[in-house]
Image: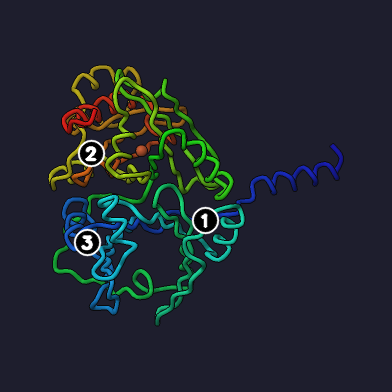
């Protein structure tokens, strides 16, 4: 290859890997809920979050109240309407409690908005500069599936506790953390035949890549099925699997979600831990309910995944699932829905090298989900 060709080839490589939407990770997840004061208490008590910040009537915000909780790199915001707040009231009336904002951290929120809306993203919020004595945050946003929003948060010039408008929330009640670290991935459920539309959205508008695909032969039990594609941003810090229902003998779990959420939305948020046995023991002792896995799963699991560092007994007692890929293994467990509607739930995940999502557990997991669906009369 000539020098010119080498340079041209290197330039092409650089162009191919240039990320037009560099994301630094998940900044926060905001939930619209019917009673934010009580939801915040639940997430502190059950999941080990700490009080961080508050905005509401006492801080000059008349129409809504927001409680901000933190645990390591995880930030959750619980927002409820108080008066004359039609956007949140409508979201709540339709969906019940659920995720509204998946906020992503960027270096330049104006550029993130430009890049994504230029490629067809529907604007939710033009770049907005918010300031207080601690500096400035620039925020912008676009719509994604259902009523879900991606906000872009630029906070490099801000040293305040959360965002301008929020005050530090000092609480006398500070339960111990549970070892939850950061958002590993966040899964969206979309309607029949809509998965590829949203795959194209994440590719075209946000510059993500499809890193894994599962079809109904991977993810089906005797009764129900779904299909899934995992979308990842350039540096892999942000991963969004997208599920759609597939035809089975009975109703898909994704269909149940769509029926009760009344539309597309966030199905589960996966939270990382460095010690899943300790984390799940804490969560369970504080009342978090997890899907039950039959004891027979553990009879043959080590034949499938090979040797692991952990003792099998505590994994079996807690119902933690194990899977392996070419790069290592992972441990995971799924909560029951955290609302009365069978909608949002959480996954707790510990990765020991594996970068995948537990394909080897799908059958056991979905059979467990179907038992719950059946108990609700929705299978
Ligand atoms: Fe997951």
Residue 144 visible within the image: yes
Whole-percent x and y of residue 35?
19, 60
* First along the sequence among labels 1 and 2: 1
x then y, percent, for residue 115: 60, 57
Relative vertical location of residue 120 with respect to residue 50 in this rendering, above or below: above
The residue wearing badge 2 is 277
Residue bearing mark 3 = 36
Residue in the image at 38% along x and 24% along y: 247
The circle on residue 131 is none
Label ID, residue 122: 1
Q: Is residue 305 or residue 51 the one in the foreground?
A: 51
Residue under the image location 26 percent in, 65 percent down = 81
Q: Secondary structure at mark 1?
A: loop
In this rendering, position of residue 65 left or right of residue 42:
right
Camera-side residue of 16 and 126? 126
The quarter of the picture showing ligand 1: top left
Q: CA distance from mark 3 to mark 2?
A: 29 Å
Q: Secondary structure at mark 3?
A: helix
Is 362 displayed left or right of 130 in the figure? left
């Amino acid at each position: 290859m000539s020098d010119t060709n080498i340079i041209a080839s290197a330039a092409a490589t650089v162009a191919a890997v240039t990320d037009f939407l560099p994301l630094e990770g998940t900044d926060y997840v905001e939930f619209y809920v019917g009673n934010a004061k009580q939801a915040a208490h639940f997430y502190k008590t059950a999941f080990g979050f700490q009080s961080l910040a508050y905005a509401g009537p006492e801080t000059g915000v008349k129409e809504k109240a927001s409680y901000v909780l933190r645990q390591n790199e995880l930030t959750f915001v619980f927002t409820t309407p108080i008066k004359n707040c039609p956007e949140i009231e409508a979201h709540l009336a339709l969906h019940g409690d659920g995720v509204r904002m998946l906020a992503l951290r960027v270096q330049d929120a104006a550029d993130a908005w430009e890049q994504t809306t230029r490629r067809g993203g529907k604007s939710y919020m033009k770049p907005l500069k918010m300031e207080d004595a601690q500096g400035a945050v620039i925020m912008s946003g676009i719509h994604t599936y259902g009523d879900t929003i991606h906000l872009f948060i630029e906070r490099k010039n801000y040293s305040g506790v959360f965002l301008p408008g929020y005050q530090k929330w000092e609480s006398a009640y500070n339960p111990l953390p549970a070892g939850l670290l950061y958002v590993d991935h966040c899964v969206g459920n979309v309607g029949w035949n809509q998965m590829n539309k949203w795959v194209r959205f994440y590719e075209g508008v946000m510059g993500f890549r499809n890193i894994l695909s599962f079809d109904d032969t991977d993810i089906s039990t005797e009764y129900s099925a779904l299909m899934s594609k995992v979308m990842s941003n350039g540096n892999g810090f942000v991963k969004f699997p997208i599920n759609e229902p597939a035809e089975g003998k009975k109703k898909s779990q994704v269909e149940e979600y769509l029926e009760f959420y009344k539309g597309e939305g966030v199905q589960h948020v996966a939270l990382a831990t460095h010690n899943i046995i300790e984390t799940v023991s804490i969560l369970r002792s504080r009342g978090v309910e997890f899907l039950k896995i039959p004891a027979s799963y553990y009879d043959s699991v080590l034949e499938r995944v090979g040797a692991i560092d952990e003792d099998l007994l505590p994994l079996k007692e807690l119902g933690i699932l194990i899977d392996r890929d070419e790069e290592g293994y992972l441990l995971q467990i799924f909560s029951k829905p955290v609302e009365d509607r069978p909608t949002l739930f959480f996954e707790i995940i510990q990765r020991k090298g594996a970068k995948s999502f537990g394909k080897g557990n799908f059958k056991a997991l979905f059979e467990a989900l179907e038992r719950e669906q059946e108990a609700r009369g929705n299978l």
